[in-house]
Amino acid sequence: MYDLHTHSLLSDGVLLPSEMAVRYAALGFKAIAITDHVDYSNIEQVIHCILAFCKHWSAKARIKVLPGVELTHLPLKQFGPLAKYARRRGIKIIVAHGQTVAEPVIKDTNRAALEADIDILAHPGFINEEEIRLAKRKGIFLEISCRRGHRDTNDYVVRHALKLGARLILNTDSHMPEDIIAPAKIIKLARNSGLSLSQIRKIYQEVARVFKI
């Protein structure tokens, strides 16, 4: 089990990265990415902190921790430059905050994010088929979210992504300790979104292969 969309106190979460890693490991997760929210105001500081943490996290620990960021509520032209900056600095997982129905998001954010060098489009809401095809061409994962509000369009994303052959990923988007849920609950939410057990297994296998975890 892997969760590549989580938040620590480096942005709007409440736990230290080490606390998050220990809690996820206790539930049987093999790897997480800590992907705190960034824009031009804090990207340099967050990247510095998460890279320092991952550098000093023990290679013998029960869980692997990948350094990440979530590009959040950006003006559309900023996705490309900030994604490039994060990648050059050594960030392994770049998430973009998609057009969730749970909060206001700038129009055309999904497309702008997909045109940048990102790995995951988080909670993409009612993403259109042209954008899904773009995600497929670029190998970008579309997120099936466990987070309340963001998960309201999971069934739509599953249905259209499967039809068009786009990659999917299952993430908690955790911010609080109670958001760090057991694998069985994630699988249940995925099943409720229209995925079969065999499809869920394939998703985790592909995530492990692509991100080498």
Image: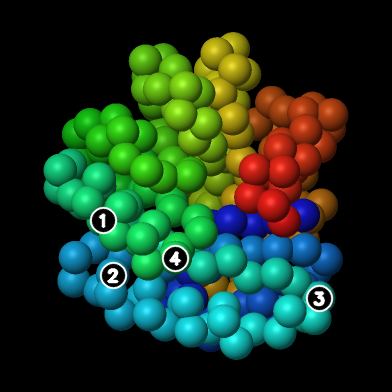
Of the pair 211 and 105, the residue shown nearer to us? 211
Q: What numbered label is drawn on residue 43?
A: 2
Q: Please name the residue shown 69% across and 52% down the image.
A: 212
Q: Earlier in the sequence, mark 2 or mark 1?
A: 2
Q: What type is the residue that disc 4 sits on?
A: Gly
- Labels 2 and 1 touching (C-beta < 8 A): yes
Q: What numbered label is drawn on residue 62?
A: 3
Of the pair 106 and 43, the residue shown nearer to us? 43
Q: What numbered label is drawn on residue 90?
A: 4
Q: Mark 4 falls on what kind of element?
A: loop
Mark whose residue sits in front, 4 or 1: 4
Q: Earlier in the sequence, mark 4 or mark 1?
A: 1
Residue under label 1, please give it.
82
Q: How far is disc 3 from disc 2 in space, using C-alphas?
A: 28 Å
Quarter of the picture containing the N terminus is: bottom right
Mark whose residue sits in front, 4 or 3: 4
Q: Mark 3 falls on what kind of element?
A: loop
Q: Earlier in the sequence, mark 4 or mark 2?
A: 2
Which corner quadrant of the image does residue 191 belong to? top right
Question: Would you place residue 29 above or below residue 202 in this image?
Answer: below
